[in-house]
Amino acid sequence: MKGHVPTPSDLADKMVAELFDGHPPDGGDRILFPGTGDGPFVAAVERYCEGHDLSVPEGVAIDRNPELLAEAEEQNGNVPVEFLEKDFLAVDASDFGQFNYVIGNPPYVPIEGLSEEEKARYKHEFRTAEQRFDLYMLFFERSLDLLADDGRLVFITPEKFEYTHTTGELRRLMTQYQVERIEHVPEDSFAGHVTYPTITTIHDRDGEETHIVRRDGTVDTVELPGDGSSWASTVRAGDTDAYDYDTGVTLGDVTKRISCGLATGRDSIYVQSAGEVPEQFVEEGWSYRTTSGKQLTVNDGPDSGDVIICPYDEHGNLVAEDELGVFGDWAELHREELESRSCVEKGKVWYSWHENPPMDDIYGVEKILAKDVCDPPEFWAERTGAVIPRHSVYYIIPENPDDLDTLLEYLNSPKARAWLEANAQKAHNDYYRMQSKLLKKLPVPETFGEKKQMKLI
Ligand SMILES: C[S@@+](CC[C@H](N)C(=O)[O-])C[C@H]1O[C@@H](n2cnc3c(N)ncnc32)[C@H](O)[C@@H]1O
């Protein structure tokens, strides 16, 4: 079942109360339930209306799963809601008109869970289908399309859309409406899932104030940036008081290596587009895929399309000058400039880099990458092991390769982000500086440490 995580009824009640707060349904109002599942929000609307002596608004409930829909219909048969088996992402205003209310818990399905055909179609049809998008982003976009003037939408989703690079366009779209309220609800709201959920209320009207409720219970009124940039520092959901870090285990304890990537002293020479590098360099193994920190964020991952021309062998030893072959002929063309680098002035061989790459550790090994100066701190998996990170990238090699996905998820969680933001040095523009010593001290859940213990025994 693609993305089915049911909403507990108390959470559905809370969201319905938020939806109708100060805006009770009136005769003729219509309500939409996208990705309705077995209908928890339909039931909650019915409970609310009964409790407040209101009539249930007419509605449309859509899901593409026929079994869940049948259950929804069976349990909520007495309400004026039409239950339709449809792909919500293929529905538009010409099908059902617009709605005064939209409420839901849209599916969380990352891009890896979609077929090539779906990815291409969504990229064509949705402005928010950028980079490594997730279905909940498209549910927001389509639902906002279907929202009537002065209509209100309440969704529960992961909070990631507040700050990731991939969700920049979604943030821009949301701020074209009034984002009235964002409430960060407890991590354990969905039994068995750690999801960092947020309830977002969007009102189709002008207005710039947003009420923020943080996970530590504090509230604030803010004005969100409208240019798609991160809301992290405005929302400051990452307040460290909200979390317990006292695990006694740090990232340094559960990793083999946390280091800064390689400095060549002249990337303008050593780094080239993969399409332009001479065939012979590739055939003779002088080039490796590479990424800079900026490329990591722009490409939302380590596929930069660039390669680095490397004078070191597979163990990271500098190749002798008389064995350089095609590399030597090419390097000679740049000799003057290469000799002017500070590392050569300090005694390094004229074609070497600032330091030897620790190839045994970094090549052929899955790793986690982060940009050195960033806002917010963000981490990506490098699964091929074939990418050599450059100096503006930090790389993290888990002690146990099986931990890569859970570690990555933790590093990108609000909890880890809050700690990093509270402890990192600040660079220009209030960006955060990732450093090996900072990353090594990051507290991680005890479970990673336990696995390490088990291995040692
Ligand atoms: C996270 S579940 C939430 C279900 C329900 N709203 C609740 O809160 O319990 C998301 C629902 O979206 C449905 N879904 C996923 N993709 C869909 C699509 N393209 N069109 C319609 N429904 C979809 C799933 O079948 C699932 O029931």
Image: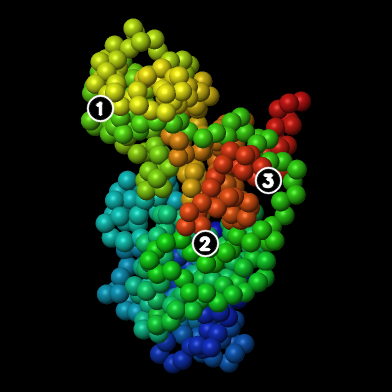
Q: Position of residue 315 (x, y in %)?
A: 48, 16
Q: Is residue 159 visible?
A: yes
Label 3 to label 1, Cα distance in Å? 42 Å
Residue 121 placement (x, y as % from top left): 28, 54
Q: Residue at x 51, y 71 (%)?
A: 200
Disc 3 beta carbon < 8 A from ligand 1? no
The structure residue drawn at horizontal position 30% and vertical position 74%, both measured from the top left corner, is 93
Which quarter of the figure has residue 435? top right
Q: Residue beneath label 1, please?
A: 277
Image location of residue 14, percent across then percent down: 60, 75
Mark closest to the chain's N terminus, 3 or 1: 1
How many C-alpha atoms fall within 10 Å of the one at disc 1: few (<14), some, or many (≥20)? some
Horizontally, residue 224 falls left or right of residue 269, namely right
Question: Which residue in the structure is indicated by mark 3?
Answer: 443
Amino acid type assigned to the residue bearing label 3 in the image? Pro
- Could you say which is closer to the camera, residue 142 or residue 361? 361
For marks 1 and 2, the one nearer the N-term is 2
The amino acid marked with disc number 2 is Ala
121 lies above or below 341: below
Quarter location, residue 402 = top right
Numbered tag placed on residue 232 in the rendering: 2
